[in-house]
Amino acid sequence: MTTVAVRASGVAAGYHGVPAVSDIDLEVRQGEVVALLGANGAGKTTVIRALSGTLPLLRGTVAVSGKTNPGPLFRRVRNGLGVLTEKRCVFMSLTCEENLRLGRGSVKEALSFFPELESKLRLKAGLASGGEQQMLALARILAAKPEVLLADELSLGLAPLIVRRLLEAITEAAKQGAAVLIVEQHSRLALRAADRGYVLRRGRIELSGTAEELRSREQDLAALYL
Ligand SMILES: Nc1ncnc2c1ncn2[C@@H]1O[C@H](COP(=O)(O)OP(=O)(O)O)[C@@H](O)[C@H]1O
Ligand SMILES: [Mg+2]
């Protein structure tokens, strides 16, 4: 039995007291990659924010690493939570190496996930390509060996080759024991890397299952995107 690292039960969350997502029941176990899928506006970011604790819950409970009342974000990060938001989490005026040093893991560990960053260490992050910036942000988080990783739109606007590299690194982190939830618009790519998935539609989970099950229901999946 593997440990459940993230569990949401009956969660509703939203803005100005109005739920954007409701009745969210999901879990991510240690060593698992889970994809959160759905069209634009379905509520994926809202779910990630409810799980990371940056948006108050209107209903339900969230437990991350067994803790339901996790305190401020810096403490949650210290306790093993890694969060990658939709915005690129990179300090543009610092070099790539300085960005990695800001993380909680070593530069060497970060480079073990993305050896291609080694030749960019002295480059200002703002001058790196979009793909390199995203690798940098992910490398910094993975170097700290997070117990839980929540990653929102990892691959937004990036070339397929880069997307594959990012997903490889995520898979490797899960192999090393992390519980990973990735939000992805490209369901096919996500379901190739993930073990399981949940599909959101208009703020509710409409479909869930193993990646294989979801891949075999491509038409149902496509319908949920309409
Ligand atoms: N800051 C906000 N204030 C008000 N409504 C928001 C805010 N952010 C998102 N929403 C609304 O919540 C719903 C879900 O959005 P979001 O979680 O960002 O979807 P997704 O990440 O799947 O594209 C949408 O209807 C969106 O318009
Ligand atoms: Mg979003």
Image (cartoon, grey):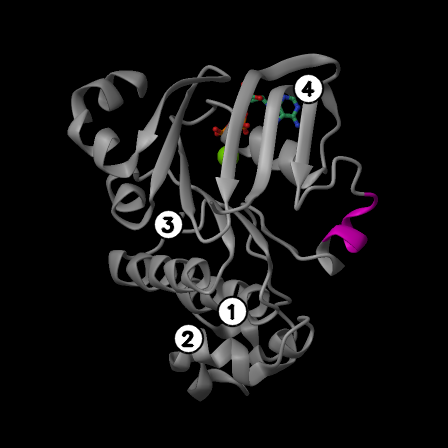
Dots 2, 1 in contact, CB < 8 A: yes
- Asked if residue 75 lies in the magenta stretch, the reply is yes
Alpha carbons under labels 2 and 3: distance apart: 19 Å
* Residue on which the image places disc 3: 157
Mark 4 or mark 3, whichever is nearer to me? 4
Q: Residue furthest right?
A: 71
Residue 36 sits above or below residue 13 on the image: below
State the residue at coordinates (77%, 48%).
73
State the residue at coordinates (26%, 62%).
161
Q: What amino acid type should be assigned to the residue bearing mark 2?
A: Phe
Q: Does residue 208 appear in this view?
A: yes
- Cβ at disc 3 under 8 Å from ligand 2: no
* Residue on which the image places disc 1: 139
Residue 47 rendering spot, x and y as whole percentages = 57, 30
Which corner quadrant of the image does residue 186 belong to?
Answer: top left
Residue 105 sits above or below residue 155 on the image: below
Q: Earlier in the sequence, mark 2 or mark 4?
A: 4
